[in-house]
Each structure stands twice: as structure tokens, then as C-alpha cells.
Amino acid sequence: MDLASIRSEFTGIRVHLQWSLLSGCAVKTEIVTAREHLGRLWSPWYVSPFGKQTSFYTLWARPISIPEVHDLLPHKRSVIADLMQSIARSGSIEIDVPAYDIGKARRLVLDRNHTLSALHRSAVPFTVRLHVIEGPIDQAILPDLRHWRRR
């Protein structure tokens, strides 16, 4: 999958990604089948030092990993529970997920965060095809990247 395919396939991407600044960036596909590997995936959601959800613009915002979403963002639990039921009925699941390489084998998930959170909590076998954009850690490309410059 290339950048154009990611952009056309994943119309649910709501982060402020500046596609025009990604010209020349590669995309690689990684296969994830182990639940513990979901721990290196990060959502585009943040909490304040007081544990409340906040914007990526907040100076002291802390990124939330996929395994933390259910516990730290209670207002997302019903959506995650519904997805877990749907996943359980399927018996197994294969999905494609767009992400951005944020270094140290970590990925910022650009879409399907709720589904990944549900997968992490389920017992169902899964295959995630993670389509990873390999671009610079530059907040001009994606404001969320300000939180990953020094991590």
C-alpha cells in the first residue's frame, strides 16, 4: 500500500495529517498477530497530568497507548464493548490499519483505534496489517508528533 492508497482507503482518518508534506515518504506493511504487540501502538488521544482527556495541543498531555484506552477513557467503553461483541461473534478478524512510525518500534494509529482497543481486550485471534508511514517526526506534518520528538 502506498500513500495515495492509504489516503483513499482510510477516509476515517481525523488527525490533522498534512498529506502534501509526505511526498516521498515510504509505507511499509507490518503484520501483527500477538496481543502484546498492540502495546507498541499509540492512539491519537491524550490525558492531562490529572488523568482527564485533553487535546494534543495541551503542553503536558500524555499520549495513550491502545491497551490504555479502555481504562483511561471511560466514555469510549460502550463503543469498545460493542466492537468486542461483534469481534467475538466473528471468531477471528483481519483488518488493515494506517499508522505513522514514531520511532523505537512504536506506531501512532491514524484510524481504527476503537477496533484495536477491542481486539486488545478480546480473546479472538486476529491479524492486523499495519500500513506504516515512514516520515519525519515533524509537527508540521502531524501536530501529534510534538509529543514524540523526545520520547
Image (spheres, rainbow, N blue to C red):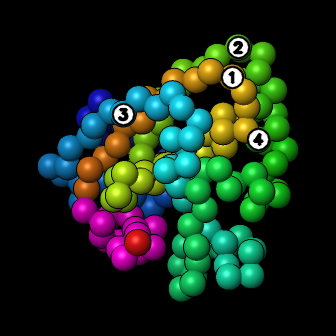
Left or right of residue 75, residue 44 in this image: left
Badge 2: how crowded within 10 Å, few (<14), some, or many (20+)? few
Residue 55 sits in quarter? bottom right
Q: Amino acid at mark 3?
A: Glu
Question: What residue does disc 4 label?
Answer: 80
Q: Which residue is the extreme one toward the left?
A: 24
Q: Amino acid at mark 1?
A: Val
Question: What residue does disc 2 label?
Answer: 91
Image location (x, y in percent) of residue 64:
61, 62
Residue 63 sits in quarter? bottom right
> Mark 1 and 3 residues: CB-CB less than 8 Å, in contact?
no
Tell me what residue is drawn at x 76 percent, y 41 percent.
80
Q: What's drawn in magenta, residue-wise?
A: 136-150
Which of pointers 1 and 2 lies earlier in the amino acid sequence? 2
Q: Circle 2 sits in a helix, a strand or a loop, which is it?
A: loop
Q: Which residue is the extreme one toward the bottom?
A: 59
Gap between marks 3 and 4, in whole Å?
24 Å
Q: Is residue 31 above or below residue 149?
A: above
Which of pointers 3 and 4 lies earlier in the amino acid sequence? 3
Left or right of residue 90, residue 148 in this image: left
Question: What residue does disc 3 label?
Answer: 30
Q: Amino acid at mark 2?
A: Gly
Which of pointers 1 and 3 lies earlier in the amino acid sequence? 3
Which of pointers 2 and 3 lies earlier in the amino acid sequence? 3
Of 15 and 49, which appears nearest the observer? 49
Q: Circle 3 sits in a helix, a strand or a loop, which is it?
A: strand
Q: Circle 4 sits in a helix, a strand or a loop, which is it?
A: helix
Question: What residue does disc 1 label?
Answer: 124
Gap between marks 2 and 3, in whole Å?
22 Å
